[in-house]
């Protein structure tokens, strides 16, 4: 078409429109649809391929559930959604102001509100300077910002979370000072970075196809495939550095896009307009 006098920019337009449709579709599917369909796959892989049996209980749970609020559970059973040996400490200006202990804690699966818990046989010590107030009871329905799924980690769990769930999980884990958040941060930023690859690889492909080479179209196709594989390899390596070497997740995920965007721009500039 360029031999008929059509400019390269005009030739590029329908390809970029197609890339936009691909990018939008990829983002929407990756943010909401694919994670839900991944649940069955991840469970199957963990159970039958990796031979990981389901963990139904965990001991000695300690986490920060809110600013200055620390929860501790001696033992929690995921089948009954209940635990025993529960305590909840509240701090203000690094001083303990409230200490709650309870024999048992039960997650309310029937409640319409999230984070609904029922504690039984409880005692609350409220500290105000030199004064101390003691309160006790047999049952207390309360809201504690934690869920049973927070106590258990499933391999590739990040792949089963929608974008809002992933964002909420990362915020809560950061608040708690939990380890291993980088894996989820990488997945979060990938959901945004991957759609942009459609524009970058499209520009590279069209630019290469419009360049005259000695090897003909086959050489252009080979160069395009090689660059695509290099992009995927670089993305995998940089993500690994974010998880294992402490690179900032956002930088590691977007670095391949930045480098290959520069390559795409250089090829675009070289192509006769």
Image (cartoon, grey):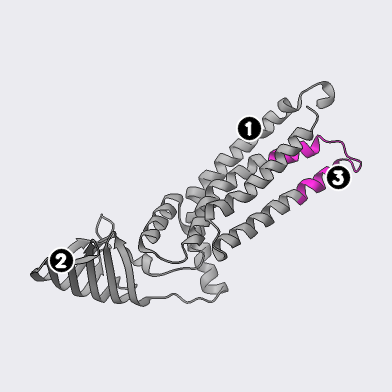
Marks 2 and 3 sit apart, C-alpha to C-alpha, by 72 Å
Taking the spot 62% from the left edge, 57% from the top edge, the residue there is: 238
Residue 256 colored in magenta in the image: no
Location of mark 1 (residue): 17
x, y (%) of residue 172?
37, 58
The residue identified by callout 2 is 140
Left/right of residue 180 with respect to residue 264 in the rendered view: left
Disc 3, SS: helix
In the rendered image, which quarter is residue 153 located in?
bottom left
Query: What is the magenta range?
Result: 201-226
- Where residue 15 sits, quadrant-wise, is top right
- The span from disc 2 to disc 1 (Cα, nearest Å) is 58 Å
- Which badge, 2 or 1, is on the more N-terminal residue? 1
Residue found at x 74% / y 38%: 266
Work out whether residue 99 or residue 13 is closer to the camera in this orientation and state it: 99
Closer to the chain start, of discs 2 and 3, is: 2
Residue with the mark numbered 3: 218
Q: Which element type, helix, strand or loop, lies under badge 1? A: helix
Q: Which residue: 57% across, 64% down?
A: 245
- Mark before the other along the chain sequence, 1 or 3: 1
The answer to whether residue 14 is left or right of residue 97 is right
Q: Position of residue 177 (x, y in %)?
A: 39, 64
Q: What is the C-alpha distance between the residues marked 1 and 3?
A: 25 Å
């Amino acid at each position: 078409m360029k031999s008929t006098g059509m400019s390269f920019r005009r030739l590029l337009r329908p390809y970029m429109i197609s890339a936009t449709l691909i990018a939008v579709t990829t983002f929407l599917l990756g943010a909401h649809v694919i994670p839900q369909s991944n649940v069955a796959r991840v469970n199957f892989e963990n159970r039958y391929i990796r031979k990981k049996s389901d963990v139904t209980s965990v001991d000695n749970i300690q986490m920060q559930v809110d600013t200055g609020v620390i929860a501790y559970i001696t033992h929690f059973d995921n089948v009954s959604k209940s635990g025993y040996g529960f305590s909840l400490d509240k701090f203000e200006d690094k001083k303990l102001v409230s200490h709650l202990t309870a024999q048992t804690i039960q997650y309310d699966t029937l409640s319409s509100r999230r984070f609904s818990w029922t504690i039984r046989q409880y005692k609350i010590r409220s500290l105000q300077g030199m004064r101390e107030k003691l309160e006790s009871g047999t049952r207390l329905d309360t809201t504690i910002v934690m869920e049973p799924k927070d106590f258990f980690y499933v391999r590739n769990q990040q792949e089963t979370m929608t974008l809002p769930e992933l964002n909420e999980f990362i915020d809560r884990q950061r608040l708690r000072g939990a380890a291993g958040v980088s894996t989820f941060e990488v997945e979060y930023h990938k959901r945004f970075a991957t759609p942009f690859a459609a524009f970058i690889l499209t520009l590279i492909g069209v630019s290469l196809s419009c360049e005259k080479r000695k090897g003909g179209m086959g050489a252009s196709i080979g160069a395009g495939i090689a660059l695509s594989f290099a992009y995927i390899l670089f993305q995998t390596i940089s993500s690994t550095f974010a998880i294992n070497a402490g690179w900032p997740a956002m930088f590691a995920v977007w670095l391949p896009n930045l480098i290959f965007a520069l390559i795409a721009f250089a090829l675009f500039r070289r192509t006769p307009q």
